[in-house]
Every structure is written in C-alpha cells, then in structure tokens.
Image (cartoon, rainbow, N blue to C red):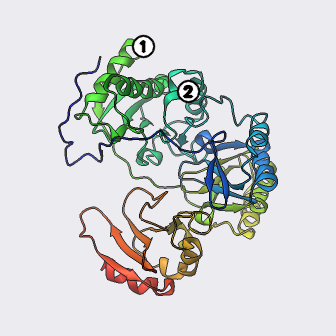
Amino acid sequence: MLAAMSTASLPPSSQATAVSRDRGDACPGSLRLHTADDGALARVRVPGGVLTVPQAEVLADVADQLGDGELHLTSRGNVQLRGLRDDCGARLAGSLDPAGLLPSRGHERARNIVASPLSGLDGRGVRDVRPWLSALDESLCASEAARALSGRFLFALDDGRGDVAGLGADVTVRAVKDGGALLVTGSADEALRVSGDEAPRAALLAAEAFLEVLRETGAQVWRVDELSLSPGELTHVIRSRLTGAGIDCVPAPNDRATAEGPPLGVIGAALSVHAPLGLLTSRQWRTVTRVAAGVGAGELRLTPWRGIVVPAPGTSTATAADALARLAGTGLVTDASSPWLRVGACIGRPGCGRSRSDVRADAADALAGAGRSPLPLYWSGCERRCGRPRGDRIDVVAAPEGGYRIGMVAQGRPARTAALDDPSLLAATLAAVTS
C-alpha cells in the first residue's frame, strides 16, 4: 500500500512539476479524433515507430483518401493525419484495423512506446530492443488496468546507447552491459536494476503501479512527474509490486542521458533521413515505402526526432547510396549539416485557430539564420508551445502584437528575450539573446 501522499516540495534537482488535471485527457487517437481548423485530426500510435511496408502503404492511402494527403511525424514516433472529414471515423478504423494498426481498441491511445531507432542495425547499443518492444506492446494490450493510462503516458526502451533514455518518458528501460536493465520512472534520481529478460514485464508493472497510486490518492494527473510525491516514494511502490510478481530488483543510480537522434546517411545496415518539420507528402512517404521494400527489410522506423530509419541488412554500399539519393531527391534531408535538423515548429496557421502566425512558413523563410543558432529553434504560434522539445533551445513564439518574441531556454544561463519583426532578420536577433 502507498504511504500517505506527501505535500513536501520536490528537490531542486528534480524536473517534476506537481499538477492536478481538472478535465479528462482529450489526447487524440485513431478512434478519438480532434477537431482542428483544417479538419479532424487522428494520431495513429506506432509503438517503437516500427511499420511494415504494407502498414505504411495503408497510412498513405488513408492520408490521400480521407485527409489532406500529408503525414506528420510526432516527437513520439507516431503519425498524425490531418484534414480528415468529421464523418470518416468508421472508414479510418476500417482501414487501420486489418493492417494491424489497431490491435486493441481499448488501448490504442496508451500504446505510446519509443525505442532506440538504430537498435540492432549499427553495432552500437548493448542489446537489440525489438524483442522488448514486441513483448511490451503485447502485454500492454492485454492489461485491463493499462486501458486507464492517459494518451500522454510514455514508455521508452533504450538499447544502452542513451538516446531515448533522455526523452523524459514516464517509464524508461535502459539496457546495461551485463544483460540487465535499469528501470526509471519520470525524472527520478533512483533506478531499479532488473533482469533484461524481465524488462518489458517490469515496465508494464511500473505503469500499473502508477495507476495504483492514482486510485489510492485520488490524484488527477496524466504523467509520472505530475505526481506530488516525495522523492523515491513511487519507486518504493514499484519495487514492492515487482517483488510481489517475482521480479528481482535492487536500487541503482539513474544514469541520466541526453536525447540525441540517429545520424543521417547510410548508418551501419540502415538508411537514415530527416523530414523537415516532421512533414511528408504522400508522394514522399510512398517513395520511402518503396525504398524500404526494395532494400529487403520490408519495414521503416519512425524516430522521435521526426526522422525515418530504413533497415537495409545485406544491402551493398552502392545500392544503399542509390537508395539514399532517391530519398534525398524527394526533399528529405540526408545531409548532417542541414539547418533543418535544428528547426521545429507547431502546426501554426491555418491548421490551428489559436496560432497567431503561419509559423512553418516563417521558419522556412528564416532557415539560413537558423543555421547560425547555437541551440535548436522551436517556432510556436502561441504561448502553449505545443510539441516543444525538452532541453536547451531557442523559443520563437508569435506575439499578440505581431511578429515574434525570441527567448533562450537553457539551464545555467540568464533568460534573455528579444523581438523579431521580420523572420529574415533571425540571425541578428539570435545574437542578441545568445551572446
């Protein structure tokens, strides 16, 4: 049982922010569509970002037949479809279900799992996490309790390289060299060391322990770091649940990691590309699927950094180079020096009625200046900053009076802001807030 909930403030080292949600979770899914200014929006969960070629082809068909012909990659490796008709819900589900994209309708919004995109492909990492991914998704869909997880709750499966371990997931499992794994909840300082073979089951039990805490305390939150608990309290509950399930676990320091996406180009037995602002037309998407089919692996992996990894085991150097050139020819980024790798944006106008600007067009106009920024830039149409990344960055936020306000978000540095009236003057304005 959980001890009485503490109201003590969290230590400065924690990133946790206690909140209370006064409304239900309205996070969109494949079955629960969100109404936007450009039509209905569906968010299709793609655990680990892994799609077979037939599944990817279905998404392109749906985008063309029911939506605006575009596919948007999210920061969790999922796919958003926009411009959908309000009455297309049944047709959408009827397309996704036979393709295996709706294995459980009761869990479709809870299947938020990111995984190291290059796991098993480039010789790095401690272990291939694909078996973990399959096991966790299967057990998640079989858990009656997990139906109560919010659409924002996130699992991360890290193969030991530390990429997705830095994404701030609610439950992170990170492989370690001796065959074990570190289980971490939220931004906790302490991890639990478990057997690598038990890692997927331990991850699900940790999520169920979180739900147990919500039931016993009446807390109305969606994510682990929103809980008002004293340090280590949730870890204690999880440890008791794991022990009761026959999983050995011992406390260990949380080996913190910095999120970093895969490099671009031919990487080991894979091709890696980036989609500017996370957007692909159905034409671009279909080229990716044809390349994926042609190199023999028959799958693609969407990354949390709005990129795509195409496994290409056994492909010759010349064939891989030709395939990469085909992807670059569609406008996807294959050059590691491209400023697009440092630029992100919310949907902006006309898709969002709250946005004050067409932030994506302005971000494109200011691309040359973005290349001079010491930090990634994120353009937002309003103060909500939807989709903003974690970590140090430059926020470019549309101002009520017109133009933008630019501010640096960086630990250990004083906050500075400046006005940007013309996106073409981005480089000069950046100097004012970063110097």
Q: As displayed, is residue 203 above or below residue 56?
A: above
Q: Is residue 251 visible?
A: no
The kind of secondary structure element at disc 1 is: loop
Percent coordinates x, y for residue 23 in the rendering: 44, 41
Percent coordinates x, y for residue 354 in the rendering: 51, 64
Q: Residue at x 34, y 40 (%)?
A: 20
Badge number at residue 140: 2
User: Dot 2 surroundings within 10 Å: few (below 14), some, or many (20 or more)?
Assistant: many
| Mark 1 lies on residue | 245
The amino acid sitting under disc 1 is Ala
Percent coordinates x, y for residue 97 in the rendering: 75, 34
Left or right of 104 in this view: 129: left
Q: How many marks?
A: 2
The kind of secondary structure element at disc 2 is: helix
Residue 216's image quarter? top left
Left or right of 33 in this view: 299: right
Look at the image and tell me in which quarter the C terminus lies.
Answer: bottom left
Q: Is residue 269 visible?
A: yes
Look at the image and tell me in which quarter the N terminus lies.
Answer: top left
Q: Disc 2 vs disc 1: Cβ atoms closer than 8 Å? A: no
User: Dot 1 surroundings within 10 Å: few (below 14), some, or many (20 or more)?
Assistant: few
Q: As displayed, is residue 54 above or below residue 183?
A: below
Q: Residue at x 33, y 83 (%)?
A: 432
Q: Nearer the viewer, mark 2 or mark 1?
A: 2
The amino acid sitting under disc 2 is Leu
Q: Residue at x 73, y 46 (%)?
A: 314
Q: Nearer the viewer, residue 338 or 19?
A: 19
Left or right of 11 in this view: 21: right
| Marks 2/1: CA–CA distance | 16 Å
Badge number at residue 297: none
Percent coordinates x, y for residue 413 in the rendering: 25, 68
Left or right of 27 in this view: 259: left
